[in-house]
Image (tube, rainbow, N blue to C red):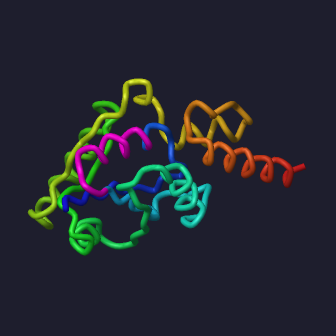
Amino acid sequence: MRIAIYPGTFDPLTNGHLDIIKRARHLFDHVIVAVTTNPAKSPLFSINERIEMIQSSIKKMKNVTVDRFGDLLVNYAQRKKAVAIIRGLRATSDFEFEFQMALINRKLSHKVITVFLMPHEKYCYLNSTIVKEVASFHGDVSHFVPAPVHARLIEKFKTRSGSKT
């Protein structure tokens, strides 16, 4: 079985992420969406909330599951017997960092390859930070995120704005 890992913080999952998952599931027998924490980021949602939102968004996809990890990605991939790490590239600005990471991962484990996938062009401008910013000002992000994520964003920012007054 060809297993691929799609790692990220997914804070929150966007339609761009979902597009990458859909593309990857047609290339591999099984895709694991691996949610992690990043010490350089302050997430809006807890890791459990992010996992729940992803699970709700992919529930009809038979060969996709959600997991969490907190160690070196290549070690996690090897434990899961993955043959590939999926990375999304929205623009050329993403490429340099992702290329460096792919080379480091290859050096750490030659058994796991990195596969770069581009989302549909309608999602190339989209990222979680932009979604959170628009949602924080109560802008409509329903076209940017799956319905379960949209509901959580509304709930989160309603609670936050209500607590400030």
Q: Residue at x 55, y 34 (%)?
A: 144
Asked whether, in this view, residue 141 is left or right of residue 73, the answer is right
Q: Nearer the viewer, residue 12 or 4?
A: 4
Q: Residue furthest right?
A: 165
Q: Position of residue 129 (x, y in %)?
A: 54, 42
Asked whether, in this view, residue 103 is left or right of residue 139, the answer is left
Q: Residue at x 25, y 38 (%)?
A: 95
Q: What is the quadrant of residue 3 in the picture?
A: bottom left
Q: Position of residue 51 (x, y in %)?
A: 52, 61
User: Vertically, is 20 above or below 29?
Assistant: above
Q: Magenta stretch mostly in which secondary structure?
A: helix
Q: Nearer the viewer, residue 46 or 59?
A: 59
Q: Position of residue 134 (x, y in %)?
A: 64, 35
In magenta segment, residue 153:
no
Q: Locate the N terminus and report the quarter of the image it occupies.
A: bottom left
Magenta range is 18-30
Disc tally is 0
Asked whether, in this view, residue 51 is left or right of residue 4, the answer is right
Q: Position of residue 21 (x, y in %)?
A: 37, 46
